Amino acid sequence: MMRLVPLILILLISCSTLKKYPLKSDRWENDIKVLESKDEDERCIDDCILFVGSSSIRLWKEIKSDMSPYKVVKRGYGGAHFYDLIHYTKRLVRNHNPKAIAVFVANDITGKNNNSWYGDLKPKEVLKLFKFFTKEIRSLHGDIPIFAIETTPTISRWSAWNKISNANDLIKDYTLRKENLNYITTRFDFFDSKGYPEEKYFINDKLHLNKSGYELWSKIIKNNFKEKL
């Protein structure tokens, strides 16, 4: 009976998280179906690293060359939040058998509350959702290495940076206490000498990375892979 207690607790926590953050729209359903259909011809297996997350992953056109010599497959969609990603995680990763999984999601805190179903989440809420995301991965892929890429400081969302960086720090602290859960710090490389985001790394929306931004991003990510994989 005692052995059942941890399992029951996990099930209760999982159900409560999904119940607290239900999908309020099928906005991303078609995007997820498209990504699932791609699995028929492109799967991440063996020494491949699977990238999941929001638009910065989806828009990374040169990811294969930028991440070389690492083999990678990307499964990013729209403006993903952790509160909707938790409902799609298994669908995005179940057809793959990767060496590791990297995740980047940067929309749960934006400073613009009217742009999301739940408004800006609190940093502790983002951490809670990240924990649930990793549990969903573990349920399918066991103790696979997971890399959390921190939210980049951007000019567009600078007004919310204090809360964003707080969420970053909470996730980083959590990963330090867990086996095969890694954190990739990027913020300092994107700051200028005054501690403000370097405009030269972003496209006109001052939110998404340009070619130079992706080149810098990939360099940081690859250095972490080299050290920990």
Image: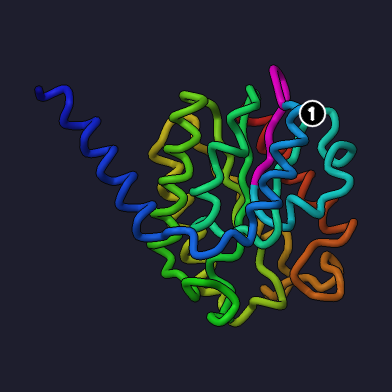
Quadrant of the image occupied by residue 92:
top right
124 falls in the magenta region: no
Q: Is residue 18 left or right of residue 196?
A: left
Residue drawn at (64%, 56%) of the image: 28
| Residue 47 lies within the magenta run | yes
Q: Position of residue 210 (x, y in %)?
A: 86, 61
**Colour scheme of the rendered structure:** rainbow
**Image height check: is 130 above or below 228?**
below
x%, y% of residue 3? 16, 22
Q: Is residue 196 above or below residue 40?
A: below
Quadrant of res 126: bottom left
Answer left or right for 100 relative to 19.
right
List x then y, in percent, for residue 1.
Answer: 9, 22
Q: Residues within 10 Å of mark 1 (few under 14, many from 20)?
A: some
Report the quarter where the C terminus lies. top right
**Which residue appears farthest toward the top when viewing the image?**
46
Residue for point 49% across, 74% down:
120
Instruction: State the residue position of label 1.
Output: 42
In the foreground, 125 or 94: 94
The residues colored magenta run 44-52
Whole-percent x and y of residue 99?
64, 23
**Horizontal side, residue 177 vs residue 82: left or right:** left
Image: 181 above or below 30: above
To which quarter of the image does residue 187 belong? bottom right
Residue farthest toward the left in the current orientation of the protein: 1
The amino acid marked with disc number 1 is Glu
Seen at 72% across and 77% down, the residue is 155
